[in-house]
């Protein structure tokens, strides 16, 4: 008898809790749409997923269009190692992505 009562309470409680969570989520989505937060979030997701441009890669590494591949690699090694030991993983990954971007550019021009 007590087990049946406990089971009924659990089922009813989970149903009520589920509806409350759903309503809160729906209300949060409505508020996000009203304030424009949802659109801004979608824009940021697409913006962050884009590939790094050649110009941005050159700015990250601090090189010019006339820099040789050896100069680029020296800058890359220096910045990568500096951020590897006690630096920022974010900056280290930016430096690595910049090298990858410029690597494709230099491979295309050498072919």
Image: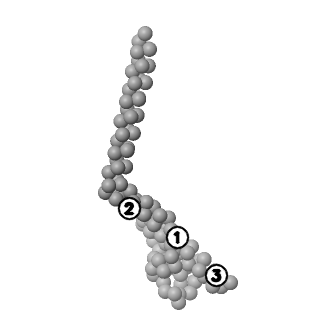
Q: Looking at the image, how many numbered discs can be counted on the residues?
A: 3
Above or below, 85 relative to 19: below
Kind of element beneath mark 1: loop
Return the residue nearer the eye: 10 or 58: 10
Image-based side of 14 in relation to 103, left or right: left
Mark 2 is surrounded, within 10 Å at the Cα level, by few (under 14), some (14 to 19) or many (20 or more) other residues, namely few
Mark 1 is surrounded, within 10 Å at the Cα level, by few (under 14), some (14 to 19) or many (20 or more) other residues, namely few
Image-based side of 80 in relation to 24, left or right: right
Residue at the top extreme, as displayed: 1
Kind of element beneath mark 3: helix
Q: Earlier in the sequence, mark 1 or mark 2?
A: 2
Q: CA distance from mark 3 to mark 1?
A: 17 Å
Q: Is residue 29 visible?
A: yes
Q: Is residue 89 visible?
A: no
* Residue appearing at x 64%, y 80% in the figure: 107
Identify the mark at residue 82; answer none if there is no mark. Answer: none
Residue for badge 2: 40
Image quadrant for the C terminus?
bottom right
Image quadrant for the N terminus?
top left
Give the image quarter of residue 99: bottom right
Image-based side of 44 in relation to 108, left or right: left
- Looking at the image, do the residues carrying marks 1 and 2 touch, with CB atoms under 8 Å apart? no
């Amino acid at each position: 008898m007590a087990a049946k009562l406990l089971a009924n309470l659990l089922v009813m409680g989970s149903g009520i809790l589920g509806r409350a969570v759903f309503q809160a989520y729906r209300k949060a989505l409505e508020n996000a749409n009203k304030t424009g937060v949802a659109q801004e979030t979608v824009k940021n997701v697409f913006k962050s997923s884009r590939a790094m441009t050649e110009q941005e890669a050159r700015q990250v590494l601090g090189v010019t269009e006339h820099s040789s591949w050896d100069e680029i690699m020296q800058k890359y090694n220096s910045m990568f190692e500096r951020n590897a030991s006690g630096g920022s993983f974010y900056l280290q990954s930016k430096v690595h992505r910049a090298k990858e971007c410029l690597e494709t550019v230099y491979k295309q021009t050498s072919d």
